[in-house]
Amino acid sequence: MAVYKKIIEKELDYPRVVLYSIPAQLPAANASARKNDEYMKAAKALEKKGEIRFERKDIKTLLIPRENNQDVIQAVQDMQYKTIALNVVLGVLSAEFTSYKKQGALVVVEGKSKFKPSRIYNELSKVIPPDVSGDCVSKTLIWEINMAESGRKSIEKTK
């Protein structure tokens, strides 16, 4: 089981941090009005929680992260060290493996994906769209590992 666990964790990147990215300057020039509205709602939720502050500059609003919150807000900077986006940590998605069946070259591993929310997830889950928060749930999964004779491994996630 440990071998298959290592294969799945390496190939599918478990545990992984689930991020939501917000431009550091709103309204974003390359986003639609609906997307800018979504970003602004998320930014207001973060401001209400005390994680960022707004700074007005002409017709733009800059999002400035507060100090000592790198556990939930990660600033993305360009080559000139200018903040261009804020990656908000929604939580950590990990995998728990319960059983496996070997059927020739095919190995079927059953388990669960477990989501551990960050301290600001509850506020953001109310404003971010369902397609973003879809990864943020614990669910039962089945992984199929094809252990070909050539040594190549391919993994398919089902269910």
Image: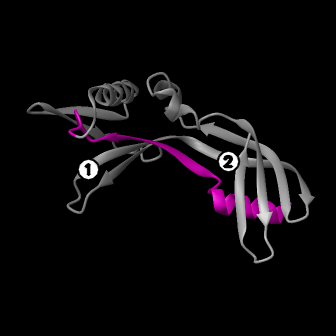
From the viewer's perspective, is 101 left or right of 56? right
From the viewer's perspective, is 134 left or right of 20? right
**Extreme-top residue of the structure:** 126
Q: Quadrant of residue 5?
A: bottom right
Q: Quadrant of the N terminus?
A: bottom right
Horizontal and vertical percent for residue 96?
Answer: 77, 47
Residue plotted at (64% across, 33% down): 137
In this rendered view, identify the residue nearer to me: 101 or 123: 101
Mark 2 neighbour density, 10 Å: few (under 14) some (14–19) many (20 or more):
some
Mark 1 neighbour density, 10 Å: few (under 14) some (14–19) many (20 or more):
some
Q: What residue type is disc 2 on?
A: Ser
Residue indicated by mark 2: 94
The colour style of the image is one colour
Horizontal and vertical percent for residue 116?
Answer: 63, 39
Q: Distance between the Cα atoms at labels 2 and 1? A: 29 Å
Q: Confirm whether the magenta stretch covers residue 8.
A: yes
**Extreme-left residue of the structure:** 58
Horizontal and vertical percent for residue 30?
Answer: 24, 40
Q: Secondary structure at mark 1?
A: strand
Q: Quadrant of the C terminus?
A: top right
Q: Confirm whether the magenta stretch covers residue 121.
A: no
Marks 2 & 1, CB-CB < 8 Å contact:
no
Q: How many marks?
A: 2
Residue plotted at (32% across, 35% down): 52
Q: Secondary structure at mark 2?
A: strand
Highlighted magenta segment, given as a residue range = 1-29
Q: What residue type is disc 1 on?
A: Thr
Q: Which mark is residue 83?
A: 1
From the viewer's perspective, is 143 left or right of 49? right
